[in-house]
């Protein structure tokens, strides 16, 4: 529908007006900084920042919660590209950005698919997969990148920013997304990405190469690349696109807004389960639900369950410690199939600690939890989900394994439903499936394939034929007939088919 097709009253809700008020808030010294330039850490104390809305439209008491819901729901019918993706929730994400600066590549509004009933029974209760692999670069990172690049585009268009070089360190998906969104603004923005050599999949490596980024492979793991890129951001004129960049967090809040919309804003008895790597995503998910709750758009905060592998579990270990005495200690990571979350020193840890505290306080009880799963559980649940019609990446398998663990521990009750974040597309990580099928995991992973979950192609070689078909050399009709009969006979035999 076009704007003119809506009633006069609804038209006032439809098109957001740009609005000042956002500022960087330092989580260390609590000082505020102007958004006129790119900042990643506090210029005074070096702590991480969040973007805070000083006078949020959503806290305006004259505007009812019902009118927000109506605005979001009407926008789904509106045919305006800038409001089709994450900026459908413009007032809750980045209000200063004018719609003309919005970069929309088709991100967001990912399917929320009810779990097959057999799979739900195996996992201990009903749940939905939210398939964030169905984003333009096939991971949720596009939500944050759409926001960060829209902000950069705004600086280019309205504040005279020129010749931006975007940089990031990545476990694979950040670089795929950063390179794609930067290339959409090519002319104004070029990109460079830093990857730990051999620690991203071939598919993930292909993505920034295809988008024309300069790709640098470094020795070590992600945490080492992050140190290098932080040094670059502190000493050179570059735009850092890691989740240290608070604009990315804003964009990723759209996940929470969509979950709320997907349940018609009734989130009672719901848990949202997601993997934790650098902890940007769980920061965004908590922040998003908090904003909706403060605006009255939802009237209860869903549980948030973060999941970590035993091979990269610093956040889990942090929350094992007694409240009030927690000290964060980075860990040295071990190889993990949830490679995109294989991070020992998450940049957003101070954000998580602060937001989880507020989340629990406003809920009046503990509602943020972190559970831990094994590499074996991650692979088994990923493959099991696929057997029931769901496509989950290894991190999605980690989420599902985390839901099962949370139900076992009583963190999620039998009658509570869950949304399980499948954060990327399965095909990016298909090499791990292959290793499972071939039983070729290096011993460090500690994964023993289960026979019932393995699968492999079966070759069919027809017997007693003089020649076989080859590309460009079809068989003569009689030989073709024999070929078809022989192959079909062999397949029917293996499948135990009966003749009609
Ligand atoms: C980045 C990423 C994660 C981890 O998210 P963080 O924000 O780093 O905690 C999980 N899964 C996938 C597929 C990712 O790309
Ligand atoms: Zn500070």
Image (cartoon, helix red, strand yellow):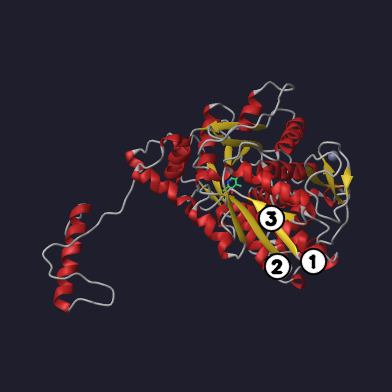
Q: Is residue 477 above or below residue 114?
A: below
Seen at 53% across and 56% down, the residue is 205
Which one is earlier in the sequence, the residue at label 2 or at label 1? 1
Determine contact: label 2, label 1, CB under 8 Å: no
Image quarter for residue 190?
Answer: bottom right
Q: Residue 149: percent from the left, percent from the top?
A: 72, 60
Which one is earlier in the sequence, the residue at label 1 or at label 3? 1
Mark 2 Cα shell of 10 Å, populated few (<14), some (14-19), many (≥20)? some
- Give the residue at mark 1: 162
- Give the residue at mark 3: 167
Seen at 53% across and 44% down, the residue is 339
Is disc 1's CB within 8 Å of ligand 2? Answer: no
- Nearer to us of marks 2 and 3 is 3
Q: Is residue 84 above or below residue 398?
A: below
Determine contact: label 1, label 3, CB under 8 Å: no
- Give the residue at mark 2: 185
In which quadrant of this rendering is ligand 2 seen?
A: top right
Give the secondary structure at mark 1.
loop
Mark 1 Cα shell of 10 Å, populated few (<14), some (14-19), many (≥20)? few
């Amino acid at each position: 529908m076009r704007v003119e097709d809506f009633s006069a009253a609804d038209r006032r809700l439809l098109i957001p007006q740009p609005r000042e008020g956002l500022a960087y808030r330092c989580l260390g010294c609590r000082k505020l900084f102007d958004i006129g330039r790119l900042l990643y850490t506090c210029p005074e104390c070096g702590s991480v920042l969040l973007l805070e809305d000083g006078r949020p439209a959503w806290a305006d008491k004259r505007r009812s919660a019902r009118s927000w819901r109506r605005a979001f729901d009407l926008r789904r019918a509106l045919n305006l590209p800038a409001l089709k993706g994450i900026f459908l929730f413009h007032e809750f994400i980045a209000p200063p950005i004018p719609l003309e600066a919005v970069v929309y590549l088709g991100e967001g509004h990912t399917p929320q698919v009810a779990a097959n009933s057999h799979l739900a029974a195996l996992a201990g209760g009903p749940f939905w997969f939210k398939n964030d692999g169905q984003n333009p670069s096939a991971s949720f990172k596009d939500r944050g990148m759409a926001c960060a690049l829209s902000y950069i585009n705004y600086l280019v268009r309205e504040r005279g920013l020129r010749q931006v070089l975007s940089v990031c360190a990545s476990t694979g998906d950040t670089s795929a997304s950063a390179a794609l969104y930067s290339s959409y603004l090519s002319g104004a923005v070029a990109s460079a990405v830093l990857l730990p050599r051999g620690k991203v999949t071939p598919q993930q490596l292909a993505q920034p190469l295809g988008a024309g980024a300069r790709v640098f492979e470094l020795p070590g793991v992600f945490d080492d690349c992050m140190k290098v890129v932080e040094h670059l951001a502190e000493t050179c004129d570059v735009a850092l696109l890691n989740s240290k960049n608070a604009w990315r967090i804003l964009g990723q809040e759209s996940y929470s807004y969509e979950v709320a919309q997907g349940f018609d804003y009734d989130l009672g008895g719901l848990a949202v389960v997601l993997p934790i790597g650098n902890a940007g995503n769980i920061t965004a998910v908590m922040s998003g639900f908090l904003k909706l709750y403060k605006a009255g758009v939802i009237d209860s905060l869903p549980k948030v369950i973060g999941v970590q592998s035993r091979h990269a579990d610093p956040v889990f270990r942090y929350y094992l410690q007694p409240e009030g005495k927690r000290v964060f200690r980075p860990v040295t990571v071990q190889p993990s199939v949830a490679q995109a979350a294989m991070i020992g020193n998450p940049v957003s840890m101070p954000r998580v600690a602060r937001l989880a505290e507020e989340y629990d306080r406003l809920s009046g009880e503990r509602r943020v939890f972190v559970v831990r799963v094994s590499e074996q559980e991650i692979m088994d649940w990923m493959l099991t989900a696929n057997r029931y019609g769901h496509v989950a990446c290894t991190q999605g398998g980690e989420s599902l394994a985390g839901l099962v663990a949370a139900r076992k521990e009583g963190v999620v009750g039998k009658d509570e439903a869950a949304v399980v974040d499948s954060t990327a597309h399965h095909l990016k990580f298909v090499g791990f499936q292959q290793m499972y099928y071939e039983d070729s995991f290096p011993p460090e992973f500690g994964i023993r394939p289960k026979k019932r979950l393995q699968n492999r192609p079966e070759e069919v070689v027809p017997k007693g034929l003089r020649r076989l078909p080859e590309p460009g050399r079809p068989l003569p009709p009689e030989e073709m007939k024999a070929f078809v009969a022989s192959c079909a006979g062999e397949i029917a035999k293996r499948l135990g088919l009966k003749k009609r």
